[in-house]
Structures are given as structure tokens and as C-alpha cells.
Image (spheres, rainbow, N blue to C red):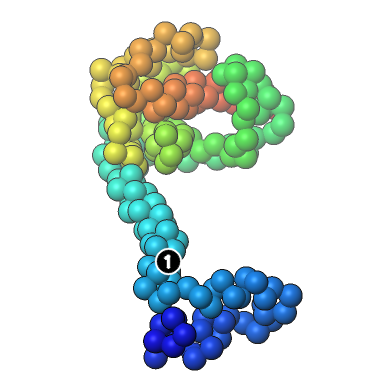
Amino acid sequence: MQGGELVSPLFPRGGWEGCFPRALDPGDKAGFHIVRRFKFPAALAFFVCLTALVCAPGHSYSEEKEKEFVEKVFLTKKEVLEAAFPGADRIDTEKKWLTDSQRQAIGKICLQTIEDQRITYYVGIKGGKPMGYVTIDHVIGKSYPITFMVALNTDGTVRDVEVMVYREPHGWEVRFKSFLSQFFGKDAGADFRNINSITGATLSVRSMVSGVSKAVAAYKVLYLDKTP
């Protein structure tokens, strides 16, 4: 203790000033006088609190994001295609690269902005004829992608819809048949606004409605209308 100030072996004899860069000293004498007269316990408490404020938010945010991300795989592509095309002689893959006019036509039907560059279809072939078409796509639920499939009859009506992968802790009820069966039989001219929602899964429901309506619109434009 010297002159009413605590001198700690942890810091220079000159007080706290020695702990700061010399470049900060000129022109701010008053500020450094205040710093130099901090009592050691108070200063230590200040730095402990400062460290807690800086470190705690990042830690809690990281933990929160880890708890939110839960990947649940319900179906693989192989399982989906086998179920969609039982007894098929083969399953062909058709990749459709979209033109600007095709994107505009699809968007006009489903009332969305289409940014896809390519849509892939899997076609079950039996006896030389197509059994139907399957497309696999992704939509964003609340924060993460929902991977789903849409199986279409050759006339463009929905035969089946399945959630393949879900990645959030809430809203997974959209995978239930009681919800997905509402899409069955719908085509590009159907009204998708009458799809019943699910309490606690509103965003996931909207995303699935958007995804399925885009799928049937794309099939109409590419296979039925054959828009160039």
C-alpha cells in the first residue's frame, strides 16, 4: 500500500497505465489518472464481468443452434423410388435444364419466383411405358431445409408425397399421412389454399405447400405443355 493505493505484484509499479499501449497515453492524461486510481479488487471485478459479457453470448448461441439442428432421416432415395415404382423394369433419370420462359411459366402457375436452374425427374418404366414421375426437392422450414419427394401420375396429378429428411425439433408433423394426403389428386390447376395447417408447424406447412405446388406446375410446363 503506497499513498493510499494498492500496489499489486501482478501489475507494474506505475499502476494500470503500464498495462495499456503507449500510443494511447498522449493527449488523455485525465483518462489515465482515473485508470491509475482504480483499486485492484474493483478493477479485477470489472475485467471478470467484461469477460463474461464477451464470452457468454457466443457460447449460449452456439449451444442453442446445436439443440435446434436435429436431422431425422425417414426415407432414402432408394427406398422412395422402390416404393413409387413397384415392379418397374428400370428407373430412368431425366435432368431438365430450365429456360427463362419455362421458369416464368412455372412461376405464373404456382405464384412463386422460380430460381431453379435444373429439375431432376426419376421415371419408372414398365413394358416400355412410363409408370409415373418422381422429383426430390428441398424447401426451408423455419431455419433448415426439408427434403421431400413428390410422385406424379403421367397426367400430372399427385400420387404421393413423402418427407424424406427433417432437420428441426419442431414441425415434423408435416410428415404424417393425415397432412400429406391432402395433396393427393391435385394438379397444376388445383387450389392449394385449402390445405389444412398444423398447430405449431405453420411455417413447415407453408413450405410444403409451396414445394408441392411448384412440383406439379413444373411437370405441367415441362411434360404436358412442353414449353420450350
Q: Tally the numbered discs.
A: 1
**What residue is shown at x 43% (from left), y 16% (from top)?**
157
* On screen, residue 172 above or below 78: above
Name the spot of residue 221 as percent of width and height, x first.
Answer: 60, 22
Residue 78: x, y in percent? 31, 43
- Image quadrant for the C terminus? top right
The spot of residue 189 in percent (x, y) is: 53, 9
Of the pair 28 and 57, the residue shown nearer to us:
28
Q: Quadrant of residue 209?
A: top left
Provide residue 160's location: percent of width, then percent of height.
Answer: 34, 23
Q: Is 23 located above or below residue 91 in the figure?
A: below
Report whether residue 138 is seen: yes
Horizontal side of 196 relative to 223 (left or right) equals left
Query: Which quadrant of the figure contains the N terminus?
Result: bottom left
Residue lying at 53% horizontally and 78% vertically, measured from the top left: 36
Q: Secondary structure at mark 1?
A: helix
Residue 226 shows in the view: no
Looking at this view, name the residue that lies furthest to the front.
Answer: 3
Please, what is the three-letter code of the amino acid marked with disc 1?
Phe
Q: Nearer the viewer, residue 51 or 67?
A: 51
Q: Nearer the viewer, residue 71 or 42?
A: 42
Please give the name of the residue rendered at 66% of the width and 21% of the height, measured from the top-left corner: 105
**Neighbour tally class for label 1: few under 14, some 14-19, many 20 plus, Cα within 10 Å:** few
Q: Is residue 187 left or right of residue 70?
A: right
Q: Which residue is mark 1?
A: 46
Q: Residue at x 44, y 88 (%)?
A: 2
